[in-house]
Image (cartoon, helix red, strand yellow):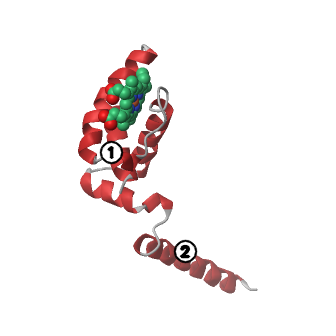
């Protein structure tokens, strides 16, 4: 293989991988672009995959301490909006510290929305 063939292959590989990424978003949603994440991004301005991961970590780390973790689809969006703030008070009281801040509470609510869509 001479140098220009290698350069051509590299360019082709880049081109193909770029195409692959795009079609993954449109057709078969990869985990990072699940329908729930797309829905959450549309609903909450500036919402990112990192917000999703942070909300999930807060939920899994704090919300199964006194009972099992409820599935995101076990409650409607309106029910979560009522239950989560109530439970955040319990979680912080039990920990005797602010383990879930107001921002964390919002991340959990948004995670539950994203994970149930
Ligand atoms: C300190 C213990 C404790 C922690 C931590 C806790 N819960 Fe609860 N949870 C309870 C108790 C007690 C109940 C039943 C009484 C009630 O509903 O208030 C309950 C009930 C629930 C229910 C069913 C109530 C309903 O109205 O449907 C959901 C859903 C729930 N918790 C979610 C959460 C989430 C989300 C978190 C994390 C933010 C969490 N819990 C953290 C103690 C806890």
Above-or-below relation of 26 to 107: below
> Based on the displayed image, in which of its 4 quarters is residue 97 positioned?
top left
- Location of residue 1 in the rendering, given as x and y in whole percent from the top left corner: 76, 86
Q: Is mark 1 within 8 Å of ligand 1?
A: yes
Crowding near the residue tagged with mark 2, few <14, some 14–19, many ≥20 C-alpha atoms within 10 Å: few
Please tell me whether mark 1 or mark 2 is closer to you in this view. Answer: 1
Q: Are marks 1 and 2 in contact (CB under 8 Å)?
A: no
Q: Is residue 81 left or right of residue 72?
A: left
Above-or-below relation of 61 to 43: above
Quadrant of picture, ligand 1: top left
In terms of sequence position, does the residue under pointer 1 or pointer 2 come before the other?
2
Numbered label tally: 2
The CA distance from mark 1 to mark 2 is: 39 Å
> Based on the displayed image, in which of its 4 quarters is residue 94 positioned?
top left
> Based on the displayed image, in which of its 4 quarters is residue 103 positioned?
top left
Q: Residue at x 70, y 82 (%)?
A: 3
Q: Is residue 96 left or right of residue 2?
A: left
Quarter of the image with the C terminus is bottom left
- Location of residue 14 in the rendering, given as x and y in whole percent from the top left corner: 56, 75
- 101 or 95: nearer the viewer: 95
Q: Is residue 10 left or right of residue 114?
A: right
Whether residue 100 is visible, yes or no, is no
Whether residue 13 is visible, yes or no, is yes
- 9 or 18: nearer the viewer: 18
Name the residue at the right extreme: 1
- Location of residue 26 in the rendering, given as x and y in whole percent from the top left corner: 40, 74
Q: What residue is shown with label 2? A: 17
Disc 2 secondary structure class: helix
Above-or-below relation of 72 to 99: below
Q: What residue is shown with label 1? A: 75
């Amino acid at each position: 293989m001479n140098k220009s063939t290698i350069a051509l292959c590299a360019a082709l590989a880049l081109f193909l991988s770029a195409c692959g990424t795009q079609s993954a978003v449109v057709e078969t949603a990869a985990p990072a672009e699940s329908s729930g994440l797309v829905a959450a991004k549309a609903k909450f301005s500036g919402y990112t995959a990192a917000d999703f991961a942070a909300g999930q970590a807060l939920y899994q780390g704090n919300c199964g301490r006194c009972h099992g973790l409820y599935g995101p689809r076990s409650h409607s969006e309106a029910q979560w909006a009522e239950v989560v703030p109530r439970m955040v008070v319990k979680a912080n009281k039990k920990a005797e510290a602010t383990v879930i801040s107001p921002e964390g509470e919002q991340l959990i609510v948004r995670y539950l929305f994203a994970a149930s869509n």
